[in-house]
Image (spheres, coloured by chain):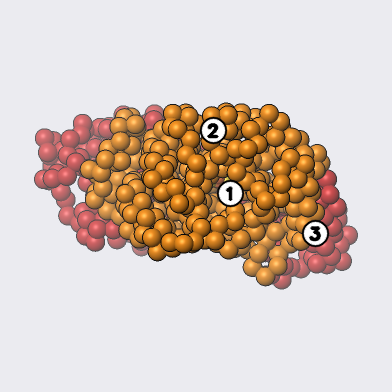
Chain colours: A orange, B red
Amino acid sequence: MIETVFVESQIIDHPITERVLSRLPNADVLNINRYQEMFNKRQQNFRLQKEKPALILAKKHDNFVLPAPPGFGMGSQKNFYFSHMYNCIYDCRYCFLQGMYSSANYLLFVNFEDFFRSISETIQNNAGSSLTFFSGYDCDSLAFEKITTFAEHTLRFFKRHPEVEFELRTKSVNIKPLLDLEPISNCVVAFSLSPESVADVLDKKAPRVKRRIRAIKELTKSGWFIGLRLDPLIFCENWRGLYSELIEDIMTDLEIRNLHSVSFGPLRYPKKMYNTIAALYPEEKLFAFPMQTTGQLVSYGPEIENEMANYIQDELKKYLGTDRIFQCLI
Amino acid sequence: MNDTNQELKFFWVVALRPEANALIQKFNLKSFSNHLNFPIYINRKNGHALVISGVGSIKSAVATMYLNNTFKPGQFVAWINIGIAGHFQGPVGTLFQAIKVVNNDNGKSFFPGLRFSKLAEPAELCTVSSPENEFTLPVLYDMEAAGFCEIAPSLSCNELTFVMKIVSDTSEHSQSLVTKKMIADLFKKNSSIIDNLLQAIVKIVDRERARLEDSIEMDGIMGSLHFTETNRLRFRKIYKKWWCLFPNESLVDRAQKASSAKDLMQSMELDIASEAQSWKLK
Ligand code: SF4
């Protein structure tokens, strides 16, 4: 799977580095000074690199916790996100990471302790407000768990902070580490989902939707709170039928009381990012659609966005109250 | 892109005449030019072009640029620096793919190429400005790769820039023992590894070419109608979308009947829009 690991010399002895390397005994390991010398280089070809990404182990020095963009969140007064990893082992064709970084290599920050210190400070500095912390913005939070143990560390941390909420976003069905833990009442495992036939085309290398739904049900049965993220909504032939079927498949036999929230959001990109991604995959029909450009934003346009949002909302209301349904607009 | 250069896929930059000779022979290259002390050899049939840079990082950078300026290939060709190198351990004759290259003079590092660790052993390489005999670090030593890596990725991309080195000397096997005959033998010994690497590389080159190159139809239409520079860019974008939806249809007839480039683009956009309501993702 991962053939090459580049390690910043300063964290070569870090326990997470040691753990990761022990999980990849056959990988070639090379030292580097700072990850930027490799990760931020220009003239990298994201599409080619994605065929065989290397893993970079590095130390993050600042900006551990950032405010989430406006329109992101499920009702808390303040929302923050943190990214222990950039890039993802899956290859969803709509993923904005393709246009965000020049490198497709996986960059893992091993100094989890600094993230937790910074999260603690953020909690202290915002005492009195309801807070949610999101992970999985720049990667999939669970997909790399066997190698990183990040989710396990993070869930244990948030267990000690019941005053705030934590959302772990994923498409992974690797739920064993979660099932091995007692459910944590302030932690939500949020799964991103699209209709099966859409995911079969676009969610490359990600687990099939059927398996994700199975994992969701298993987790709710064992007491975990689950989030459903129908994001991005993909417009295609028979989208109404496909989304209705998806929602029905999820809701059938689901422990609804453990369903924390459902959110949905449109397919939108900053113009520059859209152009970068579309140029990477010119053969992809997703990017042949006559999208609308409004200012610096590329989207399906308000007509399609509203039609889809209203429809999804109505479908969801058949199963749960509006207090658990959120429209995400970033 | 210039038509006559379409078939060139591999651009080799080598320092020494004996290294070049091994490749000239292997790929049946013919002399193309011999200016500015940078002899160039090519074979259009099998897609190889080669320049002899001479020794040193700066010469390697200049020769790379010179080879590029001579043929102006697209962004989808492979640039390969191959040659002999020192290694702390060896054994002599091993071909390595350098996946990290450090310029010893300024500390700058490069991470060239998609890595083919199943085909060639990966290694770190240090480019030095004078011959290395001490082999203090567990790496390869050469005198060119950093200069090559400074230029080649900007001509194509980092993933199509490759550095391959064959160990010729170690602390046990002095550089003074390296002869022309030995270099020829080292290349011969690694001939099948080089072939395997080229097979892997050409697949990427072809894929990138399909992604980036204007199709013959696109070229033809842009030649037959008047396009402003802005419209040219717009046409490329619309054409790619249109082709994605109608891969089996031709635009040639329509282009001949169109009163202007703008007309043609409008009709293509209408085609695309008419598909929107029943959009298929596959
Ligand atoms: S799972 Fe999320 S982060 Fe990973 S490729 Fe898909 S969209 Fe991107």
Same chain letter for marks 3 and 2: yes
Q: Earlier in the sequence, mark 3 or mark 1?
A: 1
Tell me if B251 is positioned left or right of A297 in this view: right
Name the residue located 36 percent from the left edge and 52 percent from the top edge. Answer: A115
Q: Earlier in the sequence, mark 1 or mark 2?
A: 1
Packing grade of label 2 (10 A; few <14, some 14-19, many >=20) is some
**CB at disc 2 and ligand 1 closer than 8 Å:** no
Q: Chain of mark 3?
A: A
Q: Amino acid at mark 2?
A: Gly
> Which part of the image, by quadrant, shows the C terminus of chain B?
top right
Packing grade of label 3 (10 A; few <14, some 14-19, many >=20) is few
Q: How many marks?
A: 3
Can residue B79 be seen? no
Q: Are marks 3 and 1 in contact (CB under 8 Å)?
A: no
Same chain letter for marks 1 and 2: yes
Q: Secondary structure at mark 1?
A: loop
Name the residue located 62 percent from the left edge and 42 percent from the top edge. Answer: A228
Using the numbered discs, state the Cα–Cα distance from disc 3 to disc 2 in whole angstroms. 39 Å
State the residue in front, A78 or B65.
Answer: A78
Using the numbered discs, state the Cα–Cα distance from disc 3 to disc 1 in whole angstroms. 23 Å
The residue that label 3 is drawn on is A303
Name the residue located 59 percent from the left edge and 53 percent from the top edge. Answer: A74
The residue that label 2 is drawn on is A223
**Badge nearest the viewer, 3 or 1:** 3
State the residue in front, B249 or A164.
Answer: A164
Q: Amino acid at mark 3?
A: Glu
Q: Are marks 1 and 2 in contact (CB under 8 Å)?
A: no
User: Picture coordinates of residue A326 (x, y %)?
Assistant: 66, 52
The residue that label 1 is drawn on is A95
User: Picture coordinates of residue B116 (x, y %)?
Assistant: 40, 36
Tell me if B150 is positioned left or right of B159 in this view: left
